[in-house]
Image: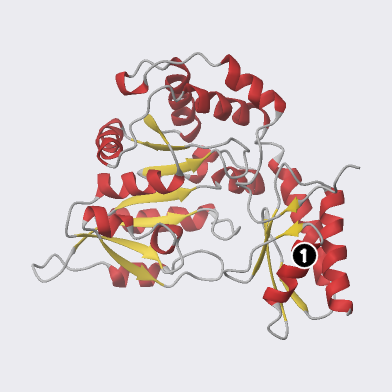
Amino acid sequence: MTATPIVDLRSDTVTRPTPAMREAIARAVVGDDVFGDDPTVNALQERVAALLGKPAALFMPSGTASNLCALLSHCGRGDEAVVGSHAHTYRYEAGGGSVLGGIQFQPVPTQPDGTLALGEIEAAIKPDDEHFARTRLLCLENTWNGHVLPTDYVDAATALARRRGLAVHLDGARLWNAAVALGEPVARLVRDCDSVSVCFSKGLGAPAGSMLVGSREFVARARRARKLTGGALRQVGLLAAAAHHALDHHVARLADDHALARRLADGLAALPGLSVVAPQTNIVFASIDGHRTEALLAHLARHGVLATGLIGLRFVTHLDVDAAGIDRAVAAVREFVSV
């Protein structure tokens, strides 16, 4: 008897490579990337740099490593980065910039839509005075908890940073989702950012890997930071081939994930005791009354549906989930609230 498949909505990082992606990995031509002679990763770096409208790019093992190397490349010891209070770089990356780079984070409140109020950014920038850390960098995130940063907001934030002498780094782990949701090329979304990190394992379904893009001078610094932090890579063309395949086949289909997220949100919103945040991309947040989050998660797991509850109920759609799986998830929640 075939077991009922798990509906895994914990994250879009849980996907397995498709058979076609596995074939692409098997066919990859590889070399030693430390010597710069892996043709598949070199081609990917050139491709992603062109897609984002930047001069150069560097393959990174993970988004956390990519953001860390960006911080180390923009800031020296004793410098400061302005970040959102709920930004991934600030809350979920083990304080790497501070621990390894001696960088001071200056958090400002993350707004419910993922933006940072421009006035609060400006107020956080320190005067040029020996008593203060030197504010050098503004960090933004797109998407944030599934929320898309409007292009006019990014334009205004980067203009403010320019005026005050700050560089801008964008954590764009799910930038592909933002581009599909807005119907804009990714290059437009990052036009005035000095550096951008994008991910291949979130949403796009590759097994691992991110890309850090920026100027050639920035990427040269980032390459040194990657070495310093233990991330020098050898025959990484195997992973780069998966990323190439993902860019060829898995970007436009992100619209399907967004549609499934709306299907899930609509189904949950119709149930008693649940409050649901309307999704903009592939992440659905909900809350259940009566402090029953842990009990609901346990109930879902018993019914073969996985979700997370670290920052409220969170469900993430991806290429390994279909409409039937979403309907199973809604039915399992319905059974729980009906008891």
Of the 4 image quadrants, the one containing the C terminus is: bottom right
Please provide percent x and percent y for residue 206.
Answer: 59, 35
* Element under disc 1: helix
Q: Is 169 positioned to the left or the right of 207 in the image? A: left
Q: Residue at x 65, y 56 (%)?
A: 10
Indicate left or right for 326 with 197 as reference. right
Residue 265 quadrant: bottom right
- Residue 291 vs 126, above or below: the answer is below
- Residue at (29, 55) in percent of width and height: 97
Horizontal side of residue 304 vs 81, given as left or right: right
Whole-percent x, y for residue 1 in the image:
91, 42
User: Front-most of 113 and 263?
Assistant: 263
Measuring from the top left, give residue 52's x and y in whole percent: 47, 35
Residue type for callout 1: Leu
**Residue 250 visible somewhere in the drawing:** yes
Q: Say if 317 sits above or below 249 in the image.
A: below
Q: Name the residue tied to disc 1.
A: 300
Q: Residue at x 47, y 69 (%)?
A: 110
